[in-house]
Amino acid sequence: MKVWAYLNNNVLCCALTPSAVPKGVNAIELDVNSPNDVIYDGKQIRAKTQAELLAEAQQKAIKDLSQQTTAYILKYYPEAKQRADMSDITNGENYLASQGIDITALRKAIGTALLNGTAFSTALSNLNTTYNTNSNTTINYWLTQVLKVSYRQYFVYQVKQEYYTYLQKIQQATSLPLPTFEFKTPFPNLTGQS
């Protein structure tokens, strides 16, 4: 598109037609994609360079990515639930430790299940078998809570890994258009035996 750019009291203005330029003002005709692609660099009115357009698009894309990452996480895992989970995991681990359960071994078992992509219900069944919760329903309750928290926190970790992958692609782009991004990490299905 053609624009006619000029300064009006040191403010850059762009007219879409030559007749829109005030009389007596010397305007510069530029061919750009948008009036936003015109700048006054302190010396001259000019079109932004490809490097400037890329840097601007990257900055906007990174900001959008950050906002969308947060929104995606909060859609499935609200802040209040994240705070409550911190309390649950502390209380759960304290109770389980008081019942003689080795928390380090429990964390390792949960971590292995997460890294192996084990379904929540299977992981819960395995923990219930390992810790024989038939005799103590409170142990079963806290194992379930600790496992749920771990799966939710692992979801956040996976989304953040996606974020860093997309961020790297945006930062490494050398031309427009920039790569697009869409989060694919599913929220875990936390149903199973209780």
Image: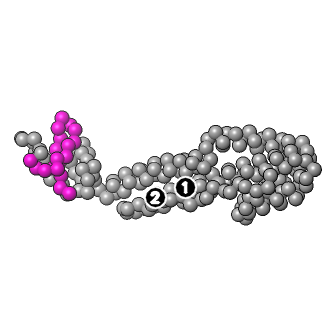
Q: Which image quadrant for residue 87?
A: top right
> What percent of the width, then of the height, locates residue 188?
67, 56
At mark 2, the secondary structure is helix
> The residue under label 1 is which amino acid type?
Tyr
Does the magenta segment cover residue 75? no
In the foreground, 161 or 149: 149
Q: CA distance from mark 2 to mark 1?
A: 10 Å
The main secondary structure of the magenta stretch is: strand
> The residue under label 2 is which amino acid type?
Ile
The image's mark for residue 170 is 2
Q: Quadrant of the N terminus?
A: bottom left
> What percent of the width, then of the height, locates residue 37?
27, 52
In the foreground, 7 or 14: 14
> Which residue sits furthest left?
24
> What percent of the width, then of the height, locates residue 117?
71, 63
At mark 1, the secondary structure is helix
Residue at 78 percent of width and 41 percent of height: 90
Q: Is residue 133 left or right of residue 68?
A: right
Q: Residues within 10 Å of mark 1 (few under 14, many from 20)?
A: many
Does the magenta segment cover residue 12? yes
The image's mark for residue 76 is none
Residue at 45 percent of width and 50 percent of height: 64
In the foreground, 37 or 101: 101
Check the image and tell me how it is coloured.
one colour
Residue 125 shows in this picture:
yes
Q: Nearer the viewer, mark 2 or mark 1?
A: 1
Which segment is the magenta one? Answer: 1-19
Which residue is labeled 1 in the image? 163
